[in-house]
Amino acid sequence: MRGGSQAKWVVAAVAVALAATACSSSSDSSSGGSSDGAVNAQGVFSYQSAEPQRPLQPANAMENQGGRIVKQLFTGLVDYDPATGALRNQVADKIETTDSKTYTVTLKSGWTFHDGTPVTASSFVKSWNWSANPANNQINSDWFSDIVGYDAVHPDKDKGAPTAKEMSGLKVIDDTHFTIELSDTVSYFTYKLGYSAFFPLPEGFFSDPEGYGQKPVGNGPYKFVSWEHNKAITLAAYDKYTGTNKAKNGGIVFRAYTSPEAAYKDLMSDTLDVLDQVDSTDLPKYKDDLGKRAVDQAQGAIQNISFALYNAEWTDPAKAKVRQGLSMAIDRDTITKTVLNNSRQPADSFVAPGVMGYKAGTCGDACKYNPEKAKQLITEGGGVPGGKIGIIYNSDGGHKEWVDAVCNSIRQATGVECLGDPKPDFKTSRDIITKKAVPSMMRTGWVQDYPLNANFLRDVYGTGAAANDAGYSSAEFDKLSHEADAATSVEKTADLYQQAEAVLAKDMPAIPLWYYKTNSGYSKKVQNVKFNSFGDPVYTDVEVKK
Amino acid sequence: MGRFVARRLLQMIPVFLGTTALIFFMVHLLPGDPLAALWGDKAPDPVQLAALKHQQGLDQPLLQQYLSYMGNLLTGDFGTSLDGRPVLDKITDALPVTVRLALFAFAIEIVVGIAIGLFSGLRRGKLFDKGTLVLTLLLIAIPVPVLGFVVQTVFGQNLKWVTPTVQDSNDITQLVLPAVVLGSLSLAYVARLTRTSIAENIKADYVRTAVAKGLPRRKVIGTHLLRNSMIPVVTYLGTDLGNLMAGAIVTEGIFNVQGVGHALYQAINMKEGATVSGFVAFLVLVYLAAGLIVDLLYAVLDPRIRYA
């Protein structure tokens, strides 16, 4: 029969298709036991994550996913106390300075990398020199710009090729001592040293940076076990760890999720142990679902809307009143309670709470809802340029709801026409903002690099700062922040920066809206889950139940 | 027959080249700079940004980029994605997962869909037939995300028969729920198409002849009626296989399946021309292969159709 012979072709074609898909890989699945409340020190727990965007190298860890893993694999000279945000020594025994310009670092002995080699002064110096070199493609290579000799390693774009591979400001004295010389006084440089770009690297790294980026060897509380792409990154507790934050569990599995809703479902069935952040759909009910296992805590991050001050119509000093008026027209309390489901806390200053130097109410009346005063100030300042504002934001970040709410609030309180101006995704909106092509306003945000108010002020509002999206430039602010940097102690620096913050409240280059919160939860299999101000759980303290 | 297949295979080459070129240039037209976005809310360090661009070859003219991409493709090098992984690794990770999921869903919709369609087509107007019409209407009306969440909550969270999401995308037993959800919409269409086709053909002359010459009922239905009624169903199934592969993104998101849909979404988001082109090229091949198989199946089902 004719059909019979033709069927052979179909069977052959289907067989080829099936064979092409037959390549499979098997893998083990581990499941933790659960019963009586006792703690299993060897127990492993899982955490909601996603595939890191960059290799796992210290100065490459800018985004969250890779960043929080790198922070577990490495420990720097100092870190921040998860409860208070205070600075504490880790690998450093002491860091001394008399002039806030030259720092002498003394290391503790006995620290080792996971491959057994000791952590020495040159582990730090070599790591920083390597990371600062633009040829090594580290996203955070400009974190070393305070150090003398950085210009020779990492010259500005129009200054030609690098002339050195080592920063002259870093000098190794012996295995446990080295000095750092800065080109200008920075009283809080020790705070910066807790940032991941300043982690040490083992000798082996420099011969194979790419390989170590896939299989990192660090000196942190956890050592690297495996990276199954798009599935999980597994870390195990490092038993020879000598730092103060030794792991109280056996390890972490950073499990990749395609959507936060899926992770929430897994948490509800105890398949996932610790959540990163509750998705917006489940936000209204997660406290009922999880009870005592729900986490609701402040985070060192702020949401602003900034003005495009580089546009001529905003440069008139009288417009500061208009900006203050617009800020007063926003009903922060109602919006955070309704639209944002209490996942944010209304802002009353330019610095997030829990950060050293935070002072409640520095924004003053300008951050309090007052429609009458708002209208009055806007009229006094000569009205909003063009009679309307648009807020540029990225529509892939869940911002639409609150931007619309903010605009509604402004419109109802003052009659100023306000519209959200969505761009399809983060990179598109960033492109417009970086090119300084925003017509009137834009969504901006800041997540702390280190818990000190300088980070929220100088790095965002200083003239020419990398995150100064508003194009704000105030001689008064710059002068005060320069004085603060030259102060003799971190406490004085924080005080002086509060004075600089007062200038912001007057000029209002950006409107502080609210602070981020960590809305998360954990499964019945784990306990003692606390979050730090970076929004990360204190992984080392998590206890897995037996 | 052999020549027909060979000709169709040769036709795939220009289609393949055309689609990869189109996709490559379209990705380039997407707004935004993914490398600058690596800096988040900070302005990128211009020195480092330029160095990264150079490393990724993005500082060259677009045509040059495309030519070197195609040149590398000939040697089997699909390029490197922004996170430093070879694109081919990403494809070989994600593709088997999606193919398995799609074939699983495909099998469900064929077996269940045709069985239901056949049964209700033979008993047109009876209770079972009416039930089928209502049920399939429901399946067509319910959006996939809703069905996904309901199934996930009932079987994963409340009954605890399975974990709510897929823990290991390579384990086919865990793909049952997503496959059912993914296949449900097409299942409804297949059932309805089969039912209509059967109900129509059962009145045809050749069926009456077959019954009249005394063939057993099983044979009348199996050899004559069903086979002749399959042509519209097979046409639908052919295009559906491609849709299942590329369109599984919603289902993959709900059930945390790390397949092509998710990988493609991320690559588009990161504006990675090489990765997107690579994935799309494979999907195009799947579409073309499915189309070829459908055409060949016509000849099997209806002996009057021949290919030379």
Image (spheres, grey):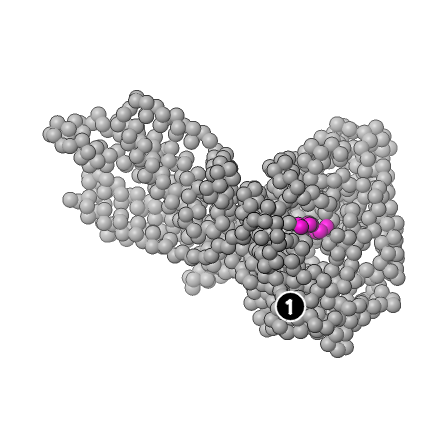
The chief SS type of the magenta part is: loop
Provide the chain ID for the residue under circle 1: A
User: Which amino acid type is marked by label 1?
Assistant: Lys
Q: Quadrant of residue A439?
A: top right
Q: Nearer the viewer, residue A540 or A383?
A: A540
Q: Position of residue B171 (x, y in %)?
A: 43, 51
Residue drawn at x 47%, y 59% is B89
Furthest residue to the left? B213
Is residue B61 shown above or below B109? Answer: below
Q: Nearer the viewer, residue A414 or B142?
A: B142
Left or right: residue A196 versus residue B305 is right
Q: Position of residue A303 (x, y in %)?
A: 72, 43
Residue drawn at x 78%, y 46% is A353
Q: Is residue B210 magenta?
A: no
Q: Quadrant of residue A115?
A: bottom right
Residue drawn at x 54%, y 47% is A271
Q: Is residue B180 visible?
A: yes
Left or right: residue A275 versus residue A172 is left
Residue drawn at x 85%, y 54% is A494
Location of mark 1 (residue): A240
Q: Which residues are magenta?
A: A528-536
Q: Position of residue A522 (x, y in %)?
A: 62, 46
Q: Position of residue B1 (x, y in %)?
A: 22, 49
